[in-house]
């Protein structure tokens, strides 16, 4: 736990409750208000009481009221046995003690995850997959249960407070990491630090990240388990010192890295960071991979001033605790090579061709087969390949990644483009004829490039001869 340094507002509240600070480590004793809470919840919520009793908060005399206390002006505040509290403990509340951590977290993409609301993903969950069948007081016109139970539970949602001060059931409970809280803050600390134990060991365990970082579009958890890093972790979990207060790689443990080791935790040269983007040198979320400072600038985050080379050096500092400099440098050559392959061969031309095809399609998002094909090419297969290379998961890089990208690019994407061209050529609308002509020209240009000309029977003769020689050699090796 970080040392507990309370802001002026908290100090005033605590002094009002006749509690004084005990230097930088917490409170001299438990507040009378928290003791009231404990006396009741020990009986009514024994599991919560037990988890809190095993926490560092308990040892610092920080309890129920210190976290749940609310101001009169808070829209989600209500009176509970004579005390004004709120159900939600937001990052703003946590910042009373953990100011530096919240500042870092608030500057990260994690805290902005709810900005997915209104994106293509939400069009799928709200319209294509969903309906307006879930009706609540906060959503009298209805809301999609697919979004409520799916997207919002990882990304977060905007929590709605009803007139009586209760929280709308479509938006609460929710531990989405980018949750938009009633006090205006973004994020949920309990997405990683599960209440009420707030276990540091649990936050460092890869399974914690696996709640959200898994599945067909971002299977980091599965990739990690496949990688040597994951194999080492699950083979040596008892050697990881996950509950150590000082958890420095190379000093307190060396058996394996976890997600936290690489992206957040302390090294001999770096402090802990709650901005998970500060060690990432590619942003592989969009259709075409970009540098992280570009995406930070687009989102108005302070990371716009931190370039990818600095971030890569931050990650290299982690890697060098276990690997040689040459090993690390060569890994990044391999990783960059995969990103370049994906971007240049599939993502850049695919995005261009998809744009040229739009005038020939129904102008409804996901109203065309090509919409789904292109979406899965970059959002599913493309991300799997890129994340697989980033985390050294070869099966996800290849069979779940580049193989599926290539198969669907050549057997789904291109044939669908050709169908649209055919349709446009036979249209009575001159604008459709022109759009078909432009798409055909774009497709021809792509297929004539070195990356794709094999598909139209124009492989370079020298390369064709080399491929035949390799095939013949393989047949000799396996003739039996």
Image: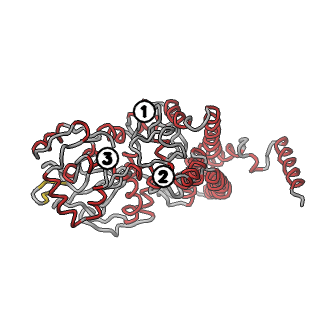
Instruction: Say if mark 1 contacts mark 2, CB within 8 Å.
Output: no
Q: Residue at x 60, y 57 (%)?
A: 427
Give above or below for 132 relative to 254.
below
Residue 304's label in the rendered image is: 1
Q: Which mark is residue 388?
A: none
Q: Mark 1 or mark 2: which is in front? A: 2
Going from N to C along the chain, the mark reached first, 1 or 2, is 2
* Residue 78 visible (yes or no): yes
C-alpha separation, residue under disc 1 versus residue under disc 2? 28 Å
Q: Residue at x 12, y 57 (%)?
A: 79
Q: CA distance from mark 1 to mark 3?
A: 19 Å
Element type where label 3 sits in the image: loop
Residue under label 2: 206
Left/right of residue 30 with respect to residue 314 in the rendered view: left
Label count reads 3
- Disc 1 on helix, strand or loop? helix
Residue 208 pos. (x, y %): 44, 54
137 w.r.t. 113: above or below: below
Label 2 element class: helix
Rendering coords of residue 177 (x, y %)? 37, 51
Residue at position x 45%, y 60% from top? Answer: 124
Quadrant in which residue 338 is drawn? top right
**In contact (CB < 8 Å): disc 1 and disc 3:** no
Mark 1 and mark 3 lie on one chain; the one further toward the N terminus is: 3
Q: Nearer the viewer, residue 168 or 131?
A: 168
Q: Position of residue 417 (x, y in %)?
A: 63, 54
Label 3 belongs to which residue?
A: 186
- Nearer to me, 355 or 218: 218
The color scheme shown is: secondary structure
Furthest-bottom residue in this view = 133
User: Residue 375: in sight, yes or no?
Assistant: no
Neighbour tally class for label 2: few under 14, some 14-19, many 20 plus, Cα within 10 Å: many
């Amino acid at each position: 736990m970080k040392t507990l340094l309370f802001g002026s507002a908290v100090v005033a509240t605590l002094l009002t409750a006749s509690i004084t600070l005990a230097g930088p480590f917490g409170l001299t004793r438990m507040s009378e208000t928290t003791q009231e809470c404990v006396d009741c919840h020990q009986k009514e919520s024994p599991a919560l009481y037990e988890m809190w009793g095993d926490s560092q908060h308990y040892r610092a005399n920080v309890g129920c009221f210190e976290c749940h206390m609310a101001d009169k002006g808070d829209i989600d505040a209500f009176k509970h046995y004579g005390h004004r509290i709120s159900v939600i403990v937001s990052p703003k509340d946590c910042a009373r003690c953990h100011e530096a951590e919240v500042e870092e977290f608030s500057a990260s993409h994690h805290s902005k995850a709810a900005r997915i609301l209104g994106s293509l993903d939400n069009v799928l969950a709200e319209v294509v997959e969903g309906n307006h069948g879930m009706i609540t007081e906060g959503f009298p016109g209805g809301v999609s249960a697919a979004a409520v139970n799916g997207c919002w539970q990882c990304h977060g949602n905007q929590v709605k407070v009803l007139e009586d001060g209760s929280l709308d059931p479509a938006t609460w409970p929710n531990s989405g990491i980018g949750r938009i809280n009633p006090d205006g803050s973004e994020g949920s600390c309990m997405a990683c630090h599960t209440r009420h134990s707030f276990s540091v060991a649990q936050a460092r365990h890869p399974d914690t990240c696996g709640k959200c970082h898994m599945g067909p579009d971002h299977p980091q958890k599965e990739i990690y388990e496949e990688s040597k890093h994951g194999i080492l972790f699950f083979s040596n979990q008892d050697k990881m010192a996950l509950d150590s207060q000082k958890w420095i790689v190379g000093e307190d443990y060396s058996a394996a890295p976890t997600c936290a080791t690489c992206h957040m935790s302390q090294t001999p040269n770096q402090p802990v960071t709650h901005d998970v983007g500060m060690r990432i040198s590619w942003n592989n979320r969009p259709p075409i991979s970009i540098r992280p400072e570009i995406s930070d600038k687009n989102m108005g985050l302070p990371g716009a001033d931190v370039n990818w080379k600095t971030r890569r050096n931050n990650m290299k500092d982690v890697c060098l605790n276990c690997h040689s400099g040459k090993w690390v440098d060569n890994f990044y050559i391999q990783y960059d090579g995969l990103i370049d392959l994906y971007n240049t061969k599939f993502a850049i031309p695919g995005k261009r061709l998809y744009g040229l095809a739009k005038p020939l399609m129904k102008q409804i998002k996901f109203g065309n087969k090509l919409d789904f094909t292109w979406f899965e090419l970059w959002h599913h297969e493309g991300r799997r390949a890129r994340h697989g290379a980033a985390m050294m998961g070869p099966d996800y890089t290849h069979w779940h990644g580049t193989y599926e990208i290539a198969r669907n690019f050549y057997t789904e994407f291109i044939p669908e483009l050709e169908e649209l061209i055919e349709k446009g050529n036979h249209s009575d609308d001159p604008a459709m004829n022109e759009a078909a002509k432009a798409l055909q020209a774009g497709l021809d240009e792509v297929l004539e490039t070195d990356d794709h000309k094999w598909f139209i029977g124009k492989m370079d003769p020298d390369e064709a001869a080399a491929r035949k020689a390799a095939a013949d050699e393989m047949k000799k090796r396996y003739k039996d």
